[in-house]
Amino acid sequence: MAYATRDGMRMYYEQSGAGAPAFVFVHGWCCDHTFFAPQYEHLRTRGSVTTYDLRGCGQSDRPVDYEVATLADDLAWLCAELDITKPVLVGHSLGGVVAVELAARHPSLPAAVVAVDPGPFDPLPESRETFAALVARIEDPAEEDPRHGYVAALFRPTDDHDRAQRIADTMCGVPRSVAAAQLNGYLRWDGVAALAACTVPLLVLLSKTGGSNDPSRLLALKPDLTVGVTVGAGHFHQLDAAEQVTPMIERFVRDTM
């Protein structure tokens, strides 16, 4: 077990492999470092890999500041602490948001960004309302934890049921205060500005089209990004469709670096 300590906050991480390219995996809302396990195992034979727990999640400490900019600065600090140069940042859901924000705030650090089913960069009004309502219910102690229902809706009927249950258990095990704070931080995030400031190659891997992250909306915001869409898996397609996601990451890196 390895930890790095930033201003008194311990961050759990794991590393393997050696050399370039260097991949750093950033998990999503209320998840942990295991949520990129297939890519971590495969890509460590192609270069170096690092995975870690965001503050508040997994085995990392739980302070109080969960703004997207803070999460991005945590990651930039961790890369410096571990002497990781020019990494490919691979972020899922909220992790995709964090990776893009890091590229905007620290443009010289990453070589490229892969956002795997990221949180919407420019949420439609109905999406923003859904997130705000979810936060309100999480923050209400009289409410049964709404994450169970929310997480269940992220899966497709064909997704692996045992894996889906493990994912739901992990996500619902994060304290409600942390879950709400992370979502509130996301709702305050200016994704349009972050996309505009992201100058490194960017791949967005979607599990479906339509809605806030429809390819047409993304390309209108950033015409030079690359969009890929997987088939037959839900939001956690890096786990349920690793045989699609991992090769697309590899091809993108090969074509852009």
Image (cartoon, rainbow, N blue to C red):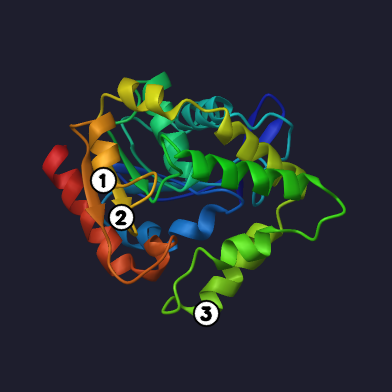
Residue pointed to by mark 3: 161
**Gap between marks 2 and 1, in whole Å?**
7 Å
Tell me if residue 12 can be seen: no
**Category of crowding for the residue at label 1, using alpha-carbon neighbours closer than 10 angstroms: few (below 14), some (14–19), many (at least 20):** many
- Residue at the image position 28 percent from the left and 68 percent from the top: 231
The residue pinned by badge 1 equals 215
> Disc 3 to disc 1, how far (Cα)?
29 Å
CB within 8 Å, label 2 to label 1: yes
Image quarter for residue 180?
A: top right
Q: Nearer the viewer, mark 3 or mark 1?
A: 1
Mark 3 Cα-neighbour bin, 10 Å: few <14, some 14–19, many ≥20: few
As drawn, which residue projects farthest toward the left?
A: 255
Residue drawn at 29 percent across, 38 percent down: 218
Residues tagged 3 and 1 counted as in contact (Cβ below 8 A): no
Q: Quadrant of the C terminus?
A: top left
Q: Inspect this view and state whether residue 159 appears.
A: yes
Check disc 2 and report the residue beneath it: 209
| Kind of residue at disc 2 | Thr
Query: Camera-side residue: 137 or 77?
Result: 137
Q: Position of residue 226 (x, y in %)?
A: 20, 42
Q: Is residue 188 above or below residue 138?
A: above
Look at the numbered disc 3 and give the secondary structure of its residue.
helix
Q: Is residue 163 left or right of residue 108?
A: right
